[in-house]
Image (tube, rainbow, N blue to C red):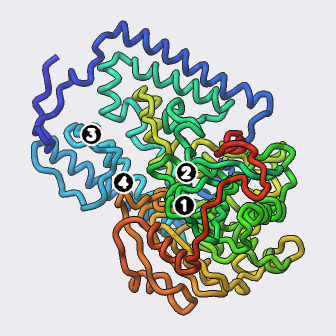
Amino acid sequence: MAESTSTTDGPAGEMPSFSDYAVRDPEAFARNMARMLEQVGKAASAWVEPRERGEIKDGPLSYSDMVATLSRVGEYWLTDPARSLEAQSALMMRFMGLWADSIRKASGAPPAEAPAGRPDKRFTHEDWSRNLFFGFLKEAYVITSDWANMLVERSDGLDPHTRQKAAFYVRQIANAISPSNFVLTNPELYRETVEQNGENLVRGMRMFAEDMMTGKGQLKLRQSDPTKFAVGENLAMTPGKVVAENEVCQILQYAPQTEAVFRRPILISPPWINRFYILDLNPEKSFIRWMVEQGHTVFVISWVNPTEAHADRSWKDYIDEGIAFGLDTVEQATGEREVNMVGYCVGGTLLAASLPYLKARGDDRIASVTFLTTQIDFKHSGDLKVFVDEGQLAEIERTMEKGYLDGSQMATAFNLLRSGDLIWPYFVNNYLKGKEPLPFDLLFWNADATRMAKANHLFYLRNCYLENRLSRGMMEIGGVRLDLSSITLPVYNLATKEDHIAPALSVYEGSQALGAPVTYVVSGSGHIAGVVNPPAKNKYQFWVGPSPSRDLSFDDWWRQARETKGSWWPHWQAWLEAQSNERVPAREPGANGLPVIEDAPGRYVRQ
């Protein structure tokens, strides 16, 4: 077949040849399509069987809620003929402009200049620009998704929660239907498929079936090569011992690496959503190892992965048998009552709630507090709020009939917050290109999900996300009304600039609930990379400004903040030294009669 001589504005100025898209070996292609369909059948069986047995409930997205929410947007535009015409006209005008631009391209004229914007990683292949068909698909997709977002933004009368949910659902749909996600509409995928006679799809669907079976009917999308990592071997490697344990947690004490250490030890309260070793990924990235190297005696709470037996464990239990148990262990191990505590994410929220609770019991052992991407005020808590309202809480409770929420539910919810980065690129790479993902320790940790005990998780969602009771002094634990304004300890409160889980604004407003001036710092990057940012990497930056107050808006704080290149870790270390700089001889794990149960990282983190 003769090659086309049409030209475009692409780099080479010529339309790709039809032969670039032609199947090389039809017989081999047909065989591979049959093999691919066999793997699709296996995946379908893995999906159907547990549902037929009633073993699987809906995932974090409620499709009925999505339909109801988007129907509210539709009602606004369809109930008024003038508005409906306005919306249709806006869409048609942009499509007419696209059609005119496509005609110009086909005739060899330069296309209309595209508005400046952030490059879209999905459309970097040259054929998105060189090929008229694929270029039209891309632009039509962009126009349609922009139009859908406009419908949500301009729908008057929606309450903020409904608007936030509608925007979230539109984003999920737009990310899912991108032409980059399908073989026939993605030129790069199409080329690879015909060049390999479909062998990429055979490999990809085999992985798809394996991931569906691994997830027992839920797709456990692999984001990293799981064979390259093992906790305790090349992750969580900082030397230490498990020196105490109960049914809720283990307490790890790390071996000293300096002859003298700070008198005041450190106890870390990590999130129980995922596992503590995000702070000890490897020797180069380990915040825990770095603290030990600075001369700190470091302890960490390693939370149990809950089972049916933990269904009724409440926040009170997690404070009594987690934080207070950790303080008891630290005191016995070191002989010191004063402890510097660090709380990360929901582990920090639990720590904040524990401060007035422990104070009411006369427990004053916490001498300073460091919060890492921790929310106290949940008014501006980001897209996770779309999963929390009365209807969805009832649905979540229904799914926890075994006494816990399966870890895959929360993992999927977190991935959906950034589906354009954490779901669809891996879907394309794994299942359509047939390529194994590269080994990446952070993404291995991200997929190492934990379960959530029923009472604990429902209390968290209702009291924090739904009713925002902690920052308003309305949360009660063990009969104690939690008044954070009574807390006057030194506080270092770290937010990250691009955090989609604990937005910097949310962390800032949470600082205002505390009763003492807070050292508020914003790190570059996001919820994980902004925290796990060792100084040796010399990456990102951080900003320091005045102490948050109700008289100083977040925007005003930004205008006054000063930027420093590199990691926030040394700045925090200087702040900590200013609290207490006295040194004592190094302490070995297992001193003062504490038993050494096992080597770090312990068995709880492997459950």
- Image location (x, y in percent) of residue 267: 66, 64
Q: CA distance from mark 2 to mark 4?
A: 44 Å
Q: Nearer the viewer, mark 3 or mark 4?
A: 3
Lower position in the chain sequence, tag 3 or tag 1 = 3
In this rendering, the answer to whether 529 lies above or below 487 is above
Q: Residue furthest right?
A: 479
In this rendering, the answer to whether 30 lies above or below 343 is above
User: Which label was assigned to residue 259?
Assistant: 1
Q: Would you call the spot at circle 4 few (<14 residues within 10 Å), some (14-19), or many (20 or more)?
A: some
**Residue on which the image places disc 4:** 143
Q: Say what amino acid the circle numbered 3 marks.
A: His
Q: Are the residues flagged by discs 3 and 4 in contact, CB closer than 8 Å?
A: no
User: Which label was assigned to residue 280?
Assistant: 2
Lower position in the chain sequence, tag 3 or tag 2 = 3
User: Which label was assigned to residue 125?
Assistant: 3
Q: Nearer the viewer, mark 3 or mark 1?
A: 1
Q: Are the residues flagged by discs 4 and 1 in contact, CB closer than 8 Å?
A: no
Q: Say what amino acid the circle numbered 4 marks.
A: Ile
SS for tag 1?
loop
In this rendering, the answer to whether 360 lies above or below 186 is below
Left or right position of 527 against 319? left
Q: Would you call the spot at circle 1 few (<14 residues within 10 Å), some (14-19), or many (20 or more)?
A: few
Q: What residue is drawn where x is 48% and y is 12%?
A: 34
Q: For this rendering, which residue is in front, 380 or 52?
A: 380
Name the quadrant containing residue 297.
bottom right
